[in-house]
Image (tube, rainbow, N blue to C red):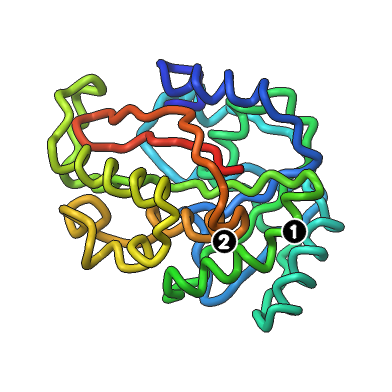
Amino acid sequence: MTALGDGAYARALEAFGKTVEPKAILVVSAHWQEPGITIAAGKKPELIFDFGGFPPELYRHRYDASGSPELANEVKARLERAGMKATLDEKRGWDHGVWVPLGLMFPEARIPVVAVSLPQGWSPQQLYKAGEALGGMCEHGVLVIGSGGIVHNLRLMNWQRKDAPVDAWASEFQNWVRDAILRHDVEALFAYEQRAPHAKRAAPTPEHFVPIFPVLGATGKTARLTPIFEGIEHGNVSMFTFQLR
């Protein structure tokens, strides 16, 4: 529903989009998992509506940015130079982890976009190294986005109330992650399942949490965290969004 411009989080993404002008955008989304790294290489990817039960207007949503086969090939080359196999997929569309935030940040849809899959079973350290392989792209104007959620447990969220009181365990986990990033303590983040408070409750499965690691790798250990939005909705769904540069 955020895609329809509803609420403070949507407004925060809109405001952030006005502060940056990337030449291209690279997105690692929680909603695209493959056995290895796959890169969407089509010229005009279609939107994937990978959800059900929402109002009709959401399924009429458009985001008509172009893809970039050139950038996709560059991503593949950089990963392979770092010893990581990657494949191109010219038919893969953009899931809602791509088009929802980009539609709010860059509604004009004039910046080319490339999506990259999450390789299943990769450790945080491996994902971080993949980010390191792509780090030089940031210096050339490519915005690298990890799209997921710091706290994401649909079984425990309050579906009825977006403004429900925040569960203490959710804010404690979010604060731990934010503080570890501020300290540049990537070793603690690598071991978040063992070291973070309430990790099993906050991130019962890894796919929404681990998109953070390619971004951390791409931006390096000296990157400064600037919050974009720090709220928690539906009792425990973290909307914590931040910039590293």
Is residue 107 positioned above or below 79 on the image?
A: above
Kindly identify which numbered label has been placed on residue 217.
2
Q: Secondary structure at mark 1?
A: helix
Q: Quadrant of the N terminus?
A: top left
- Percent coordinates x, y for residue 17 in the rendering: 64, 26
- Along the line of sight, which residue is nearer the eye, 239 or 19? 19
The C terminus: image quadrant = top right
Q: Amino acid at mark 1?
A: Gly
- Residue at horizontal 53 percent and vertical 42 percent from the top: 224
Q: Which residue is under mark 1?
A: 136
Quadrant in the picture for residue 62: top right
Label 2: which secondary element? helix
Kind of residue at disc 2:
Gly
In the picture, the disc for residue 182 is none
The residue located at (41%, 49%) in the rendering is 181
Number of disc labels = 2
The answer to the question of whether label 1 and label 2 lie on touching residues, with beta carbons closer than 8 A, is: no
Q: Earlier in the sequence, mark 1 or mark 2?
A: 1
